[in-house]
Amino acid sequence: MVDVTNAIRFLLNGEDIALTDVAPDQTLLDWLRLERRLRGSKEGCAEGDCGACTVLVGRVFGDEVIYDSVTACIRLLGSLNGCHVVTVEHLRGENGQLHPVQQAMVDQHGSQCGFCTPGFVMSLYGLWMRNPHPTRSAIEKALQGNLCRCTGYAPIIRAAEAISSYGLPQGDVLWAERIAVKDRLIALSQTGRVEIGAGENRIIIPASLDDLAHLYAKYPEARIVAGSTDVGLWVTKFMRRIGPVIFINHLQELKAVTVSDAAVNFMAGVTYSEALPTIEEHFPQLRELWSRFAGEQVRNMGTLGGNIANGSPIGDTPPTFIALGARLTLRKGNERREMALEDYFVAYGKQDRGPGEFVESLFVPRLPAGEHYAVYKVAKRKEEDISSLCGAFRVGTDNGVVTSVRIAFGGMAATPKRAAVVEAALMGKAWSEETIEAVLPLFGEDYQPISDMRASADYRLLAAKNLLRRFYMETEGTAERLSREVA
């Protein structure tokens, strides 16, 4: 029997919060600004892109409290049970002085119009607590999701480099509070299941993974929400009703990553940030791509399972994992079924998932020794942009002859899709420039892309062909040789 309570409980800065009246589509930013009058967090874009609304959200993970920077504009209030929300108003130094992050921003002239400044401060605060002496690269990565319209990045980066000259994290007020905060969060999260409201206004927070499976089988009309990086935009941009909602971002069982000699198994609730160490160790070819998924705040919220479950034709992880031969586990109640990831996507907006069934885990085989693998993201901006197309390539050869090949694209069809005709034409042929040039026209048989705001159909088809050329050149070392010759 699961205990049921009717309040969402979390900490706001130093205050205990208990809410019994929460709408499924209520954002953290609206609640902070309208209900709590904490207006340091700004609304700039309402879609998680500009970072002006950045706050920290802490949750007990293992034996410690982990704080992530998140965009409050698309973070839903119902997802905060058992969390510690830290806003810019909570920052303070000793004896009423400015916090080290704030003082560094002042001294380095890191604020111009000031609108974006609180968001930058909170992103830098989160970085400083994790890494008090970050490299320039680490600073830039932490600030990917923060936009300064006054073009003040240089002084902001100088401020980031200077923070620890004003003090170290161990002397920070929040650092000193962590032990007490941890105990309070553990107590808040041990409340069993939370149920609030009724009908479209209903919020359910399961007590466990098994409880989630039971609830979703019972209420298949409910919407499962993890990171809300997609659903948040449905609320802020399309004004869609999303209730009833089952929030799952707190479920530790969905955060597990299991590594074996053959594969890596990611549970569906693993965020991009949580997956990164495993990706870097076991799939190093994806390291650069991973840092191009949105900004730090969105990577801290978005989940692997959510990106797949939504079935977007322009999602970057589906083609990435399809090329590796990944498999999904779907669950309904106590029953599970497996399928190849590529078979999950049926048509635009339609996936092979029945009522009450949800994505539970993703099984990703390791790349066999000797095979080549690469993924390329093409977008209008290098950082924090949705792909025009994303291509994943994998090939195995024996004595220069293709023995295995998988090519998958996002952004080229109504679903993430393999280039079956091109693959068939490559099999058994010499892995050579002549072979590559011969199969390029066949992309037109695999894909009939559309023209939209991100790219024209002709551009997409030409880019797909050129990405196969690039992949071949990189596998043969031609690209590296040409770059040396040009230099």
Image (cartoon, rainbow, N blue to C red):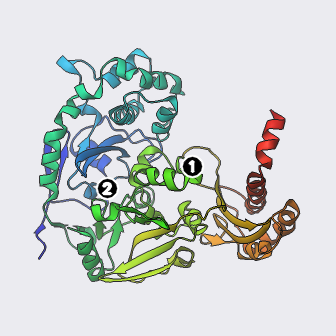
Q: Residue at x 78, y 61 (%)?
A: 465
Q: From the image, which quarter does the N terminus lie in?
A: bottom left
Tell me residue 459's x, y (percent).
76, 58
Q: Is residue 23 above or below residue 215?
A: above
- Disc 1 or disc 2, which is closer to the eye? 1
Give the side of residue 209 with respect to residue 290, left or right.
Answer: left
Give the side of residue 36 with respect to residue 486, left or right.
Answer: left
Mark 2 falls on what kind of element?
A: loop
Which of 110/22 is in front? 110
Tell me residue 291's x, y (percent).
53, 46
| Total labels drawn | 2
Which of 324/88 is in front? 324
Give the side of residue 447 with respect to residue 175, left or right.
Answer: right
The residue carrying pointer 2 sits among few (fewer than 14), some (14 to 19) or many (20 or more) residues within 10 Å by Cα, namely many
For marks 1 and 2 on the same chain, the one whose residue lies earlier in the sequence: 2
The residue carrying pointer 1 sits among few (fewer than 14), some (14 to 19) or many (20 or more) residues within 10 Å by Cα, namely some
Q: Residue at x 78, y 47 (%)?
A: 479
Q: Amino acid at mark 2?
A: Leu
Q: Is residue 213 above or below residue 205?
A: below
